[in-house]
Amino acid sequence: MAMSREQEKEILYEEKKTWKRRVLDYLIITAASFLYAVAVSLLLDPNELAPGGVTGIAVILNRVTHITTGTWIFLINVPILILGMWKFGLRFILSTAYCTLAISFFTNLLSKTGAVTEDLFLASVAGGALMAVALGMVFKAGSTTGGMDIIIKLLRLRFPYARTGSLFLLTDAAVVTLSAVAFRNLEVALYAGLVVVINSFLLDVVLYGRDGAKMIFIISDHYEAITRRILEEMDIGVTYISGSGAYSGKEKNVIMCVMKKQLSPKAEEIVKEEDPMAFMIVTSATEIFGEGYKNIFSEKL
């Protein structure tokens, strides 16, 4: 059955809107990668602060082998990205691969500048804060920085009841401990631990709030378009709740969805793009039971 001219125009409009959105996402990822590299090259790496994760491992290996930190970030991520592509598909890994390349490039580019401060406390606070801002931008653009983000996602597949925060804490603690041994300096390692704490706190509280998850109710005449994008781009479940306007008496489908807190900015962006006039309620969900969250039979911690 041939499409009408109006249908063809609508498809072209949607494709153009999708293309513009992707370009904007990659611009945000590029800017975030630069900020992340500033934190590493100008604050953390010159002061031998290994802030956990792949970046921390790269800082340590830089001192052992004299290969640049940015190069090590890339080399460590290559097998992780390949594994992630095998497990999660090319679409998931594409923006992450770009982010990894951008961080590696900017880190090497800025490494020639040298430290902006030799004060370990100031470097820890500023470095951890910049990393948190950069990570928040990357998450909002629907991507990750690779490395431990993918490793933790894989571990969650193998151990679905393990808490994501706990897994990150364990891996970061292991890298910080390794830095104490590699640099033979406990004080520097303690400051590296401070970087991890500041980064986690700011990313958690300032960008996404303190709660474990977000519950969103969306009332919109464009609920089908919003639902389609949430399902396709965020891979989370959506439930329709039947309702009606008390004044108009018009029947409405209310979208209800629950998601990890770092995904909520992306969901809000989708609603804003599809229907600026939508009525949206974002609330905190302290405990979520079901697939992808807690097991209803698990013990409370």
Image (tube, grey):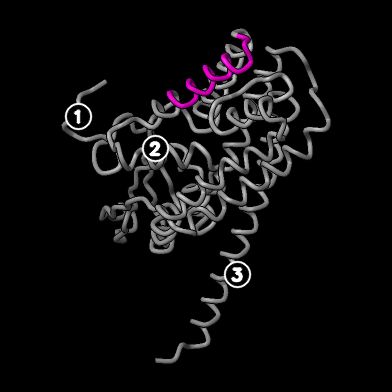
Q: Nearer the viewer, mark 2 or mark 1?
A: 1
Alpha carbon separation for disc pair 2 and 3: 30 Å
Kindly tell me whether residue 132 is visible in this rendering.
no
Q: Which residue is mark 2?
A: 214
Measured as percent of width and height from the top left, residue 248 is found at 34, 58
Give, as a single range, the part of the protein colored magenta: 170-185
Q: Quadrant of residue 55?
A: top right
Q: Is residue 115 magenta?
A: no
| Residue type at numbered disc 1 | Ser
Q: Quadrant of residue 230?
A: bottom left
Q: Nearer the viewer, residue 246 or 104?
A: 104
Circle 3 Cα neighbour tier, 10 Å, few/some/many (<14 / 14–19 / ≥20): few
Q: Which residue is mark 1?
A: 298
Measured as percent of width and height from the top left, residue 243 is found at 27, 54
Which quarter of the rendering shows the C terminus? Answer: top left
Measured as percent of width and height from the top left, residue 83 is found at 45, 49
Measured as percent of width and height from the top left, residue 135 is found at 58, 36
